[in-house]
């Protein structure tokens, strides 16, 4: 499989697309509005401690206070961090990529950490060093942790732990043990490390150099923390194009094409320092048309913002996103099949699986995802669809957990959510319906007006009523629903004059009583 990174860099926005065999599979967008702050490190101040939730809110000078759970808090003893919580199964880098499996044993884990209370660890007004682990999503503020991780190309430094993990993608046991020994012998102090996939077969000298670099970076962060004002930025994560070079290009992409001369120079300088061999795989785009148009990416991005996605067979899927979960519905649409109903349904479901896996990854959907497949009678067909879902998600670097198909034909899954999904990043709620997705029916509005006039009529003393409404409702009241006005005039024994107002929302109306 040939993978290519396409980077479109402008003054206000940078877009990075990962292509697999010419098809876009992931899209990363960064704007100059500080909307993506994952990986940034702040000197925060505890705003409020919530014992009932075993969590706290931390002020880091964002639009919403950051949220931290008790399990994400490290204790500070004599200026040396002591680990409070450590996931004994998996580790992830700052971008949420599944990179390592812990080699620590249960015996090395802290004792009775689950009994620690948030009030024992934090107090209101306390200063704390935190790193953003999840960007703000909707009305929710960012999620932070005090278990800092500093990713490099080969290693991830974890100053608040002392264990060493090795990427699960490094399968050779002898190589895993060699790398672990190198890091163990080269580290200074009791810092923890994750050994990334790129470190495979890497020499001891290069690994030791990166360890010194990361440890010096951590020391600088600690020094800044001592003198920085409260609720201030201490360390900023790399820009999106450099993160893509570090985490994608050096590990899995074959070529990189960028349309910005300054961005090209930045990337080649970065590679000069960390991996000069890859410089020849970086191209500066010089075409006349926009780079994303040249690679036919804009259409796929627009399609990824639609609620309905058509399948080649004529079927379609509906993707509906809420605050807590994503619902995906599969429908046969125009596809009628060739032989029997069960075969038609199976083919539609299997085709939908490929599109669903593609859309989940491209849209960066996270949290709870419920997929409603078309009901199948045969258990074997249900197993085929379930296995296809698992296989389709294999290329996804984000951690997923998929449950077998239920009796109702539903597949439930979770996907780790780090950033705002593509739809939330590129779109905003409709200014007209305010994100509701539906509007009150026009006849319903007419009947609401009827009832409201009757309520007001009990206290009326004027001789006439004026009714200001949206022009569409005015047309309806003058035409098809004119009987409403005639009936009201007979009941309240007053004239009703209708004034269309183009500035009114379709559901808005105003009833004014006139004395003359």
Image (tube, rainbow, N blue to C red):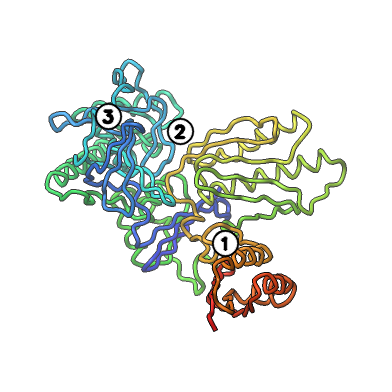
Q: Is residue 477 left or right of residue 69?
A: right
Residue 357 in the image, given as x and y percentages of width and height: 60, 44
Kindly check if marks 2 and 1 are in contact, taking CB atoms under 8 A apart as contact. no
Q: Earlier in the sequence, mark 2 or mark 3?
A: 3
| Gap between marks 2 and 1 measured at Cα | 34 Å
Residue 80 in the image, given as x and y percentages of width and height: 17, 31
Badge 2 density bin: few <14, some 14–19, many ≥20, Cα 10 Å: some
Q: Earlier in the sequence, mark 2 or mark 1?
A: 2
| Gap between marks 2 and 3 measured at Cα | 22 Å
Residue 252 in the image, given as x and y percentages of width and height: 46, 45
SS for dot 2: loop
Q: Residue at x 57, y 76 (%)?
A: 468
* Residue placed under numbered mark 3 in the picture: 161
Q: Is residue 132 left or right of residue 312?
A: left
Q: Is residue 186 left or right of residue 144?
A: left
Q: Nearer the viewer, residue 78 or 484?
A: 484
Mark closer to the observer (2, 3): 3
Kindly check if marks 2 and 3 are in contact, taking CB atoms under 8 A apart as contact. no
Q: Earlier in the sequence, mark 3 or mark 1?
A: 3
Residue 189 in the image, given as x and y percentages of width and height: 18, 29
* Residue placed under numbered mark 1 in the picture: 302
SS for dot 3: loop
Asked whether residue 57 appears in the rendered view, the answer is yes
Write down the quadrant of residue 344 in the picture. Answer: top right
SS for dot 1: helix
Q: Is residue 302 above or below residue 230?
A: below
* Residue placed under numbered mark 2 in the picture: 169
């Amino acid at each position: 499989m040939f993978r290519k990174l396409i980077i479109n860099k402008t003054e206000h926005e940078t877009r990075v697309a990962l292509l697999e065999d010419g098809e876009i599979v992931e899209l990363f967008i960064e704007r100059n509005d500080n909307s993506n702050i994952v990986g940034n490190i702040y000197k925060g101040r505890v705003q409020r401690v919530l014992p009932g939730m075993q969590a706290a809110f931390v002020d880091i000078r964002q639009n919403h206070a950051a949220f931290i759970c008790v399990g994400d808090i490290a204790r500070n003893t004599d200026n040396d961090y002591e680990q409070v919580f450590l996931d004994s199964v998996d580790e992830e880098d700052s971008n949420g990529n599944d990179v390592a499996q812990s080699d620590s044993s249960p015996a090395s884990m802290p004792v009775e950490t689950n009994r620690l209370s948030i009030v024992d660890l934090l107090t209101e007004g306390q200063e704390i060093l935190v790193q953003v682990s999840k960007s703000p999503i909707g009305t929710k503020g960012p999620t932070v942790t005090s278990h800092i991780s500093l990713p490099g190309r080969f290693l991830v430094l974890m100053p608040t732990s002392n264990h060493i993990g090795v990427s699960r993608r490094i399968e050779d046991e002898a190589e895993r043990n060699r790398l672990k020994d190198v890091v163990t012998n080269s580290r200074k102090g009791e810092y923890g490390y994750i050994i990334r996939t790129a470190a495979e077969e890497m020499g001891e000298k290069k690994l030791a150099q990166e360890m010194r670099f990361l440890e010096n970076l951590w020391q600088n962060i600690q020094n800044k923390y001592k003198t920085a004002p409260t609720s201030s930025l201490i360390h900023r994560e790399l820009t999106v194009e450099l993160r893509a070079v570090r985490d994608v290009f050096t590990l899995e992409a074959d070529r990189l094409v960028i349309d910005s001369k300054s961005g090209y120079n930045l990337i080649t300088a970065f590679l000069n320092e960390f991996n000069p061999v890859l410089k020849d795989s970086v191209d500066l785009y010089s075409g006349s048309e926009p780079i994303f148009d040249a690679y036919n990416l804009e259409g796929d991005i627009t399609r990824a913002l639609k609620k309905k996605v058509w399948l080649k067979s004529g079927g379609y899927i509906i993707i509906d996103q809420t605050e807590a979960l994503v619902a995906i519905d599969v429908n046969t649409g125009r596809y009628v099949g060739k032989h029997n109903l069960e075969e038609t349904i199976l083919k539609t479901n299997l085709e939908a699986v490929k599109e669903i896996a593609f859309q989940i990854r491209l849209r960066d959907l996270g949290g709870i995802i419920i997929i409603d497949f078309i009901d199948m009678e045969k258990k074997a067909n249900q197993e085929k669809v379930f296995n296809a879902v698992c296989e389709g998600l294999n290329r996804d670097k984000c951690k997923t957990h998929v449950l077998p198909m239920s009796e109702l034909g539903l597949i439930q899954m979770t996907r780790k959510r780090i950033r705002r999904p593509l739809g939330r990043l590129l779109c905003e709620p409709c200014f007209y319906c305010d994100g509701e997705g539906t509007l009150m029916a026009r006849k319903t509005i007419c009947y609401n007006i009827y009832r409201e006039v009757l309520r007001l009529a009990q206290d009326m003393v004027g001789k006439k009523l004026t009714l200001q409404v949206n022009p569409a409702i005015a047309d309806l009241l003058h035409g098809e629903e004119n009987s409403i006005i005639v009936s009201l005039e007979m009941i309240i024994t007053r004239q009703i004059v209708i004034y269309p107002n183009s500035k009114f929302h379709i559901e808005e109306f105003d009833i004014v009583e006139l004395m003359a």
